[in-house]
Amino acid sequence: MRQIDQNIFGDVALPQPIRNLSGPHVELATMQSDKEVTPGELVRLAVTITPDRDTHVYAPGAEKDHYIVTSLTFDPSNLYSVKPIAYPKPEMMHFPESNETEPVYTGKIILDTSAAAIVNKETLAIFAKDPLLHITGSLEYQA
């Protein structure tokens, strides 16, 4: 069994938030499906983003007008693989002051994916010394 680094995603099953964080203008929660998994098994990872009232975050597509879009990325590693994230459908919001219409999220969104430890001779030797799988990455957004 592999134990997922609890500093990032905690130890309870989805959809329960396991770590609540506050960011500027948003509430964040991270979740994971399993505390322990066998090497090669998938674990579901998710981040919930809830913009404050009367606040929006930019969705993919708004980068064309130089906005920072909401994105969850994981650092590359020879110890794990992460499936691509499917982003929810945004709503289009018109901004009269700039005469722009941009894709945004105004309510709670969940960005989720699956990850698995890579199983080979090299990684099994590493996991024998340290059974924790540290999955790292970053969340970006502009509110």
Image (spheres, rainbow, N blue to C red):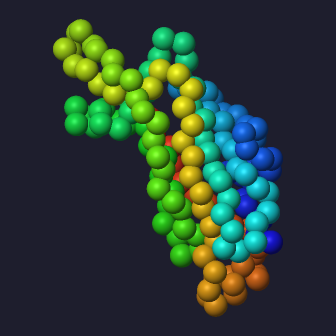
Q: How many marks?
A: 0
Which residue is at a point 80% across and 50% down the rendered structure image? 11
Which residue is at a point 22% across and 19% down the rendered structure image? 100
Q: Position of residue 51 (x, y in %)?
A: 53, 23
> Does residue 25 appear left or right of residue 92 in this picture?
right
Of 107 and 21, the residue lying toward us: 107
> Does residue 7 appear left or right of residue 62 in this picture?
right
Which residue is at a point 70% across and 34% down the rendered structure image? 20
Whether residue 134 can be seen here: no
Quarter of the image where one finds residue 78: bottom right
Quarter of the image where one finds residue 143: top left
User: In the picture shown, does residue 85 fall above or below 40?
Assistant: above
Whether residue 128 can be seen here: yes
Which residue is at a point 22% across and 36% down the rendered structure image? 64
User: In the picture shown, does residue 20 fall above or below 79?
Assistant: above
> Does residue 84 appear left or right of residue 1 in this picture?
left
Q: Position of residue 135 (x, y in %)?
A: 61, 60
Toward the bottom, the furthest residue is: 121
The quarter in which the N terminus is drawn is: bottom right
Q: Position of residue 45 (x, y in %)?
A: 63, 51
Toward the left, the furthest residue is: 99
Q: Position of residue 10 (x, y in %)?
A: 76, 49
